[in-house]
Amino acid sequence: MPVALFISDLHLCPTRPAIVGLFQDFLTRQARQADALYVLGDLFEYWAGDDSLGDTFNAAVCAALKDLSDQGTRVRFIAGNRDFLTDAGFARASGAEILAEPTLTGIAGTATLLLHGDTLCSDDAAYQDFRREVRSPAWRTSFLSQPLAARKAQIETLRRRSEHEKQIKSAAIMDVNASTVSEVLRSHGYPRLIHGHTHRPAHHTHDVDGHLCERWVLGDWYATGNYLRCDESGCRYLTLPTP
């Protein structure tokens, strides 16, 4: 029976060694028993460009993923808002296939739409404007032309600004918009939907034009690790031991 596992929003960084260790253990245990591991964004706290593979920490995380891939588990990756600058160098180092967003694929016989999830938060107009700006080829080229140290400093500034904005924005504006979810499901043929980003793990059912569509939201890895397991019998959440 084909088995696929899904994770997102790990925000791995050197200052959170317990979670990093839990992730590495997950790769050698649960993930190695699966046919495929899907990482739906924000694997890293931030990714400043593929030249940051020179950082020992980033190289070690990618090497762990590459070992999983070499052992036979297919690793597939959709970039999040923290690691959208991942490119071919990351793919080679990690053994991951970088997928377009969104990606519609078959998971154990069920049509499934995969995305990070930030595009569903359409009520946050300021964030969506920012997202369009930093995802543009012109911005990417300009940003990556700067020295790595300068890029990291800019990212740290953006992270502090983002944390401040989270304190003043309403919880509702940072969650998904129901109409946007329905339109995405409609435009892709009413599939099952799996995403992360909101850090609000839950299983939802949406009635879209008479079609009942499942939406599975992945959890973050701040307190402990968790993943979604999908096979021919359906999907279920599983939680890893607290580190």
Image: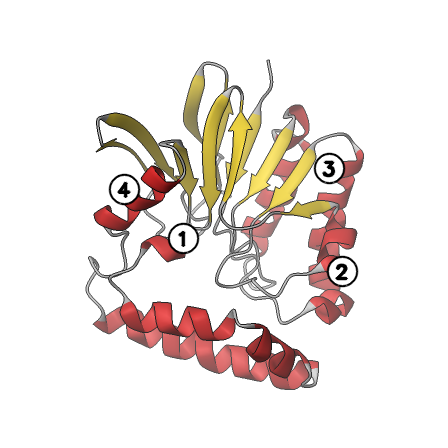
Location of residue 26 in the rendering, given as x and y in whole percent from the top left corner: 61, 36
Mark 1 or mark 4: name the one nearer the start of the chain.
Answer: 4
What residue would you read off at disc 4? 182
The reply to whether discs 1 and 4 touch (Cβ–Cβ < 8 Å) is no
Mark 2 or mark 4: name the one nearer the start of the chain.
Answer: 2
- Image check: 16 left or right of 63? left
Query: Residue at image x 22%, y 31%?
Result: 209
What residue would you read off at disc 2? 89
What residue would you read off at disc 1? 197
Query: Residue at image x 70%, y 61%?
Result: 57
Cα distance between the residues tagged 2 and 4 = 35 Å
Element at label 2: helix
**In which quadrant is the N terminus drawn?**
top right
Disc 2: CA contacts within 10 A as few (<14), some (14-19) or many (>=20)? some
| Kind of residue at disc 1 | His
Disc 4: CA contacts within 10 A as few (<14), some (14-19) or many (>=20)? some
Cα distance between the residues tagged 3 and 2 = 17 Å
The reply to whether discs 3 and 2 touch (Cβ–Cβ < 8 Å) is no
What residue would you read off at disc 3? 68
| Kind of residue at disc 2 | Gly
